[in-house]
Image (cartoon, rainbow, N blue to C red):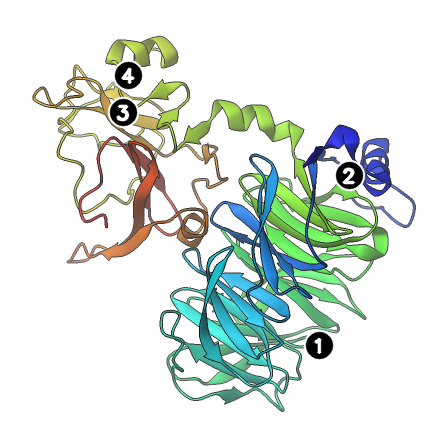
Amino acid sequence: MQMSAGIGRALLLLVALTLAGGCGGGTSGAANTPLVSLARVPLEGAPRALVAHRGAVWALNAPRGGVTRVDPSRPQATPGRRLGRRLIDASSDGRRLFVVDGGSDTVLRIRSRRAADKLARIAGIRSVTAGHGRLWAATRDGRVLQLDPQSGAHVGPAVDTRPALEPPLKLAAVAEGLVVGDPKGRIALLDARTNAMDVIARAAGRVVAFATGGHGLWVAVGGRESFVAQVDVSGRRLTSRRRLEVAPAALAQTSQGLDVLLPGLEQVRRYEWDAERFVEILTGPFVTSIAHASGALVALQEGHAVIFDDPRSRAARRSLRIDEVTGSYRGVKLGDTPSQVRRRLGRPVAFDPIHDAFTPLQAPSFVSFPPDEPEILALPTKQRALRYNDVFFFTCKMETSCARRVGAMLIAGSRAVTTRGITIGDPLEEAQRAYDLHCDTLSLGGDLADHEYCTGKTGPRVYAFFGGDPIDNIQLALEPFPNQR
């Protein structure tokens, strides 16, 4: 690994142009808000693409048939052994990473850098996408198949998308089924239950890429008209259309915005959700793919993974960071005494256990809870409750080893972020991608809506709970949450 002080000519050009305010070739309409280069990590072989999975970025080394895991938090790259003949596409559903081996027409389920299961063989397979408990594959001749993510068995018959669509196809998994785009700008929805397909939108350009996340499904279109837009699946239309001067090549969605790779301008731009504007965050040649993990942007450039960070949000992330490994938030750790909490965060807000919910003051009226809380926790009282605007600390019962100390915390602050970049408002699937979690649905009965959640061990003695989809709260505890596997 080489840090940014020792990077090569291409990265020096990249950083110099970024910090200088951009390069020639049309940057009008985009402000300059550069990221900072943290490291330039060499990759084996000829990497083809990047995919985010469980807090890291995985690079497909197409000719060598292997994958390399890039950890932005270290930063370092760990190559694996040969898993296939020619890896051409990949997708993560949060728990599992699926890769297409174009050399053997096989879908692989990656177990580690060095091990993979052959899940299914599909003649002419070109791409896959995973999400919402489903795995989809598309072939060179325009056929689409739904597969069981566990066994690889076909779920229903293959669907021939022609003549409504023309291959090669771009895919995105959504709750309703599969969204499919083609080179003529047509976007269709394939219903997961009926296998019926309807064109829901059209554009005068080529569908380049989709990106899913906390702000829904977005599409990049390039050609006669170039833009990014949100896909309103239920409304069967494109909304929030934002024009681009040149054709985009890739998308990556984050909690801050939508990152768009523009090779024609040698730029990466971010469409900021809050400001509703484009800002130029990266300028330089030869960037071919982008992905996000652990709060960092990773760009594929000339056989290297270049890791970038946003200096504007770094300090805020540090102060509001949820450390799910050590079990801490805003300087308070699991096991701290109430007096230590008050010294760190000040006096708690007033709390009435009869009328108030056991949630932070600024939490929404309803947050998703696990089926039950760990048995070590005591019921908060009016005098002893540790309730703050963005977090509620629960203390342990007297008869436990952590008596009267913090045994759990419920965090609902909108700007809180885990060490792997998961924030309140992210899709639950993002947490599944970042951690090894058990996920389930809690049925509340009556008129109350069911809610989804995920739990898992994230540190030596730290257990995490991600509630709701999108996530409305994150909890850390000293003991496992009931029903956790």
Q: Position of residue 393 (x, y in %)?
A: 27, 24
Secondary structure state at the residue bearing disc 2 = strand
Disc 3 or disc 2, which is closer to the eye?
3
- In space, the residues marked 1 and 4 are separated at their CA atoms by 57 Å
Specify the amino acid type for callout 1.
Answer: Pro
Q: Position of residue 136 (x, y in %)?
A: 48, 74
Disc 4 or disc 3, which is closer to the eye?
4
- In space, the residues marked 4 and 3 are separated at their CA atoms by 10 Å
Specify the amino acid type for callout 2.
Answer: Ala
Q: Are marks 3 and 1 in contact (CB under 8 Å)?
A: no
The numbered mark at residue 336 is 4
In the figure, residue 168 lies in which quadrant?
A: bottom right
- In space, the residues marked 1 and 2 are separated at their CA atoms by 30 Å
Image: 257 above or below 62: above
Residue extending furthest toward the right = 24
Chain-order first, disc 4 or disc 3: 4
- The residue that appears at 64% across and 40% down in the rendered structure is 275
Q: Position of residue 175 (x, y in %)?
A: 42, 66
Residue extending furthest toward the left = 399
Residue that label 3 marks:
393
